[in-house]
Amino acid sequence: MAMPVLLIVAIAVVDVHTGTNVHLGPLLVIAPALTASFGGPWMVAAVGALAELAQIVIAALHGGLTTTNHIAQMVALALLSALIVFYCAVRERRVRQLAQVQSVAEAAQQALLRPLPQRIGPLRIASLYLAAEDEAHIGGDLYTATRVPGGTRMIIGDVRGKGLAAIGESALLLGAFRQAATQHETLPSLAAALDHSVCQYLNDFVEVAADPEEHFTTALLLDLADDLPLIRMTNCGHPPPLLLGGGTVVVLESPHPAPPLGIHGMGPGEESVDSFRFGTGDILLLYTDGVIEARNRQGEFYPLADRVAQWTGHSPEALLHHLHRDLLAHAGGRLGDDAALIAVQRMPVAHEGHHLRNLMHTGAGGE
């Protein structure tokens, strides 16, 4: 507030102490215009009134209030100040409306994609979501986790498309997973149920006849046992996760991939499940293709596995913190697609050595 007031005083003092041929009064309109950048309509009106008072003082000391030039300056200043006040009032009303809409949108988006807890059973979890659309908190990428008897079941997926247009399909898939996760014994049967839900949604609400291959969802389904150092995974066309452990980064490619969800007649078979060792202290990094398809100015994709290798000894939270900064730096501060990252670390549990010996004797160690 001090800046426009000092500006009015300075213009008035300089104008009064210069000759009658110099007219600085028109510059007084700068004060209310400047106030509009940080103040509301009442503050702008107060500064405009102060500027009008300064103009009257200048007129009284330079030829009188009734001269044509001074009358024109006072009228013009009053009109311009009133116009700026009106602009501020309209802007404030729109800001309030936008804040209300954003508040509702944020509540809806947070209800849809609830943050993952930091601990689920023996798992330590950190997650990161970067939406491509401005003012959006989520888009076409999705993830969630739920407890099942003896472990944790997770999904991370990517609806084709980005931003708010893909929220309907991601909401459908999240709801279907939360309902079906505890009702199916195996991951392939769960994936088949989710595929049926996505196909039904596309049939009922989305026009896919013109280009059916443009409507599908990639997904990664995981079973993480509480008392076994083991991952069971069904990959439905999703980018393979990374396993960080012992200072190395391993890409968990699926030997038995399943097709993406929503491609009619191509549901996963019962053989579409893979097992991998997931020992204490290891970190499983899940991500969507918005991460690995982020390009720099030279058009180069983000080398996720190479970058992750720098931070294999970090905690899940620190790992995602480094990846967040590095990914945005690579992409120039803005992503072209939604991106999600989840880091899951297995923490020590009682009697793990006993279960591991049993696992190795039964030959279920996976790859």
Image: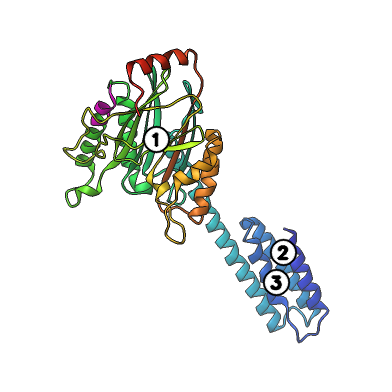
Answer with left or right where residue 22 lies relative to residue 102: right
- The answer to whether residue 4 is above or below residue 147 is below
Depth order, front residue of 330/338: 330
Residue 99 on image: x %, y %: 51, 47
Residue where numbered disc 3 is placed = 28
Depth order, front residue of 209/239: 239
Residue 167 location, quadrant: top left
Residue 38 within the segment the image draws in magenta? no
Task: Work out which residue is located at the far bottom of the displayed protein and give it.
Answer: 21
Q: CA distance from mark 1 to mark 2?
A: 51 Å
- SS of the residue under disc 2: helix
Q: How many marks?
A: 3
Colour pattern: rainbow
Residue 96 on image: x %, y %: 52, 49
Residue where numbered disc 2 is placed = 4
- The answer to whether residue 12 is above or below residue 106 is below
Q: CA distance from mark 1 to mark 3?
A: 57 Å
In this rendering, the label closer to the viewer, 1 or 3? 1
Residue 87 location, quadrant: bottom right
Span colored in magenta: 186-192
1 and 3 marks in contact (CB < 8 Å):
no
Depth order, front residue of 141/319: 319
**Is residue 149 among what the camera can see?**
no
Residue type at mark 1 is Tyr
Residue 185 on image: x %, y %: 28, 20
The residue located at (42%, 19%) in the rendering is 226
Residue where numbered disc 1 is placed = 143
